[in-house]
Amino acid sequence: MISLIEELLGYNFEKPYWFFLLLFLPLFIWLFFKLNKEKPFAFKYTNTIDQQQRISSFLVLTLKMLLNSAKILLFFLFVSILASPSKIDPDQPKPDQNGYGIDLIFVLDVSFSMQAMDLKPNRLESAKRVIGNFIQQRKNDRIGLVAYSGEAYSVCHKTTDYKLLGAQLARINGNDLIQGTAIGVGLGTGITQLRGDSTKSKAIVLLTDGKNNVGDVSPIEAAELAVNEDVRVYTIGVGTNGYAPIPNMGAFGAGFSYSLVEIDEEILNEISNLTGGQYFRATDSRSLNRIIMEIDKIEKKLLNKEQSVLPLTTDLTPFLNIIICLCMIIIIGDIFLFIQYE
């Protein structure tokens, strides 16, 4: 019944239990007619009784019915107001009408160790392929890219031009950067792209295969900056367990050697916990792809939750106007229709 009332009136009701008062409506109607049964209801505008009865009967009975209906409607509206009617403002834009969904920055480790071949063809190319596939599926998200090694730079500022972003992603290799793993500097560079942004859903996906060993900004300092900017950071440790093959230019030409995989999972976990994100471990290309898709699902869920909670604008003016008009009708009716003219 309440859902039908909401559909008819176009309002939601915060206290719908007040509508149980409508169960007393039959009693109200019976009492109302009982009290007014013997009360004369007519205009007496002529001294001729025959003319009075003949001319006034239809008009007066119609007015009487309208007045009684108005009083019943007045009771219904009074109950509706007690139920706290409210409605979503149709002129207010929804979050997804602002043009964007998630603001997402990929912070990608491009240090030499990302050339390890435990992910096919290697860690860096596997990460680039997964990120590229992810970008191709986007519609309203603004996505940016930061590359870091011993230093960091913004490869592409957040954009919806996915073709440009994909082209920039394909070109990065880290050969021109100072070697090392500056996780804090890379994360801090990603945060600068989101600083001051009013978008509610802001996230960073940081990928690395090592430990922070250079840079003026520690990973925890960068994480605290992310907290201040309301940015969630998802961290991904890239690399198999144990040793991984890595290219090695020896005296007899190109070859490869085995390097121990050292991922600082404790720090990566701490970064994600501080910022409200999650830490993941990718040991192969397939698991890396699943992780990126899982992060996408988490962010979409959070975004949908934000969009579903739209502000309710209480608007009682139409109800009050109707009640005022009905009160005026009732008062006028009581003054003029219940008075007999001699």
Image: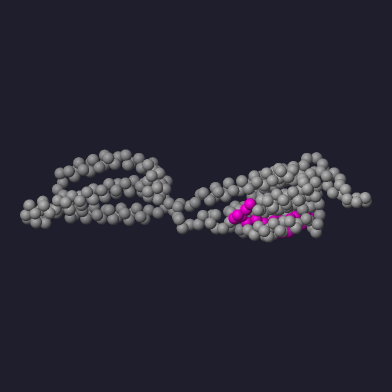
Say which quadrant the N terminus sits in: top left
In the image, residue 140 lies in the stretch drawn in magenta? yes
Magenta stretch, residue numbers: 137-155
Residue drawn at 24 percent across, 54 percent down: 329
Examine the rendered structure and indicate whether residue 269 appears above or below residue 168: above
Which color scheme is applied? Answer: one colour
Residue 324 horizontal/vertical position (percent): 30, 55
140 or 32, which is in the foreground? Answer: 140
Residue drawn at 29 percent across, 48 percent down: 73
Residue drawn at 27 percent across, 53 percent down: 326
Location of residue 98 (image quadrant) = bottom right
Outermost residue, right side:
251
Query: Could one spot residue 269 in this view of the protein?
Result: no
Residue 185 horizontal/vertical position (percent): 73, 55
Examine the rendered structure and indicate whether residue 79 appears above or below residue 150: above
In the image, residue 225 lies in the stretch drawn in magenta? no
Tell whether 46 sits left or right of 107: left
